[in-house]
């Protein structure tokens, strides 16, 4: 989790020279021989500039190349279903390519199940951190003394003239656009500790924004990190990102339902820092982070072990005087289950029956969940769970196959490894205490715990738009 509001300036000359959209040849553009990954994608290519000012549409007959950071301002960037955007790899993390939507702009990136919008590496054999990632900044409140913050991973000295690189404001229902059926792969840039780009970074994004059906895969830092704001999200997969799979900070108060985090045993994870969920409280004492989370599946590897010396930490870690509500979720195969780290976070936690459906937003609640760790003594640290939350072994979670032999088996069309075999044996499925939520968001009732199955019983991880190899 990151603490800086203002980042230390990096070396000047942060941006490469701007490429033109009509660059002369594929060889000159440095394009890889990567395969087209959606049936809706054409084969023409074009570079994106350093600044897009006003409205622009990216068409799916073209593969767009990021050779620098591309800032969108004063308009809407529309991306057609099936469009592919590829980031070139740079020599240093500080120069990592990225697409950045500023708070005076918006994005309309709406893919479909058969034609998702794909952000990926422009390297023939891709790897985590090949490019920087997708950043969206909005005008919703953030928990900093000034009410604004600078997004991580950006050197102010390298920002083009006239571009706003701050996020945060007073518009809780701020609308940064739509992001639907979008896949982000091999992103992230670790410039220094506490100064990183993630697969998808949201800063001060308001609940007028529509976000659902995201897959964030094989990133070099966090999968999805949200700084402040109150954007609501449904259906998000964060898989094999090498730090935290989900990260919440700076007063984030939105709601998320149907979320899955999965670990690939072959990936090198950040030493002593990799959690399924990490949640920090913010920088203003009366404005604390408090996400409302329902139907999450946080699944670590078999025997809680990855194949490198950099081991995982907690399925969920709540710290720095944070607040939270978590229900109807499954946490398994991390060395530690649920950890509360500090006095303020511990004092705000309630396991009282009297608070089971409380609307007290100063408290934290963890009801109707299933937790499994490789050592039962580490299932709950600095907390006593409510009786509706149970500890059990992996075998008794009643998922079809929590840790299949092949990572790809989580997503194959014929396999449903994270499908609950039965409705929860303990506690039922309750949605009280998860509201009120602003804007039009509402939690869907679901008879099954965890995040991999929608209310109609569909195992959405096997849908074609996810396409994890």
Image: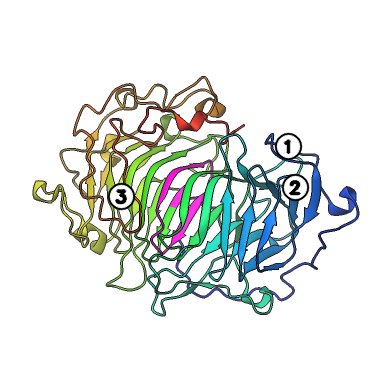
Kindly identify the residue that appears in the image at 30 percent across and 49 percent down.
339
What residue did someone put label 1 on? 36
x and y percentages locating residue 154 in the rendered image: 61, 68
Label 2 with label 1: CB-CB less than 8 Å:
yes
x and y percentages locating residue 147 in the rendered image: 41, 76
* Dot 1 or dot 3, earlier in sequence: 1
Q: Quadrant of the C terminus?
A: top right
Say left or right for 48 vs 285. right
Residues shaded magenta: 221-246
* Dot 2 or dot 1, earlier in sequence: 1
Number of numbered callouts drawn: 3
* Dot 3 or dot 2, earlier in sequence: 2
- Secondary structure category for the residue under label 2: strand
x and y percentages locating residue 49 in the rendered image: 75, 64
Q: Is residue 244 magenta?
A: yes
* Crowding at mark 1 (Cα within 10 Å: few <14, some 14-19, many 20+): few
What residue did someone put label 3 on? 339
């Amino acid at each position: 989790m990151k603490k800086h509001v203002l980042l230390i300036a990096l070396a000047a000359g942060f941006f490469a020279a701007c490429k033109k959209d009509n660059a002369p040849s594929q060889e000159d553009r440095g394009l890889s021989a990567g395969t087209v990954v959606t049936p809706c994608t054409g084969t023409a290519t074009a570079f994106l500039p350093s600044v897009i000012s006003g409205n622009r549409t990216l068409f799916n007959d073209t593969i767009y190349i990021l050779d620098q950071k591309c800032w969108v301002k004063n308009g809407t960037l529309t991306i057609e279903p099936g469009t592919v955007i590829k980031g070139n790899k740079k020599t240093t993390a500080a120069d990592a390519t990225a697409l950045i939507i500023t708070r005076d702009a918006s994005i309309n990136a709406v893919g479909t199940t058969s034609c998702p919008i794909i952000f990926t590496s422009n390297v023939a054999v891709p790897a985590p951190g090949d490019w920087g990632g997708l950043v969206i900044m909005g005008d919703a409140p953030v928990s900093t003394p000034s009410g604004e913050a600078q997004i991580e991973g950006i050197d102010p000295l390298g920002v083009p003239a006239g571009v706003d690189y701050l996020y945060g404001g007073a518009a809780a229902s701020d609308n940064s656009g739509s992001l639907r059926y979008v896949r982000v792969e091999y992103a992230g840039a670790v410039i220094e500790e506490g100064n990183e780009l993630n697969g998808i970074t949201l800063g001060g994004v308001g609940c007028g924004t529509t976000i659902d059906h995201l897959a964030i895969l094989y990133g070099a830092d966090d999968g999805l990190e949200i700084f402040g704001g109150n954007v609501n999200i449904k259906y998000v997969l964060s898989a094999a990102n090498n730090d935290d799979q989900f990260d919440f900070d700076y007063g984030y108060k939105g709601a998320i339902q149907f979320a899955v985090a999965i670990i690939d045993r072959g990936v090198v994870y950040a030493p002593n820092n990799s959690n399924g969920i990490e949640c920090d409280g913010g920088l203003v004492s009366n404005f604390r982070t408090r996400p409302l989370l329902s139907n999450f599946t946080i699944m670590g590897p078999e025997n809680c072990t990855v194949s490198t010396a950099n081991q995982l930490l907690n399925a969920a870690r709540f710290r720095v005087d944070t607040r939270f509500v978590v229900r109807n979720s499954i946490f398994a195969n991390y060395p530690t289950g649920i950890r509360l780290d500090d006095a303020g976070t511990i004092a705000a936690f309630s396991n009282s029956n009297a608070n089971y459906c409380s609307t007290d937003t100063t408290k934290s609640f963890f009801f109707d969940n299933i937790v499994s760790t490789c050592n039962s003594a580490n299932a709950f640290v600095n907390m006593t769970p409510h009786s509706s939350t149970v500890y059990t072994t992996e075998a008794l979670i009643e998922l079809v196959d929590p840790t299949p032999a092949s990572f790809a088996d989580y997503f194959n069309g014929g396999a449903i490894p994270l499908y609950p075999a039965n409705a929860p044996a303990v506690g039922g499925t309750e949605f009280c205490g998860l509201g009120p939520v602003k804007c039009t968001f509402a939690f869907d009732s679901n008879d099954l715990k965890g995040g991999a199955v929608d209310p109609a019983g569909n195992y959405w991880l096997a849908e074609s738009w996810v396409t994890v190899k």
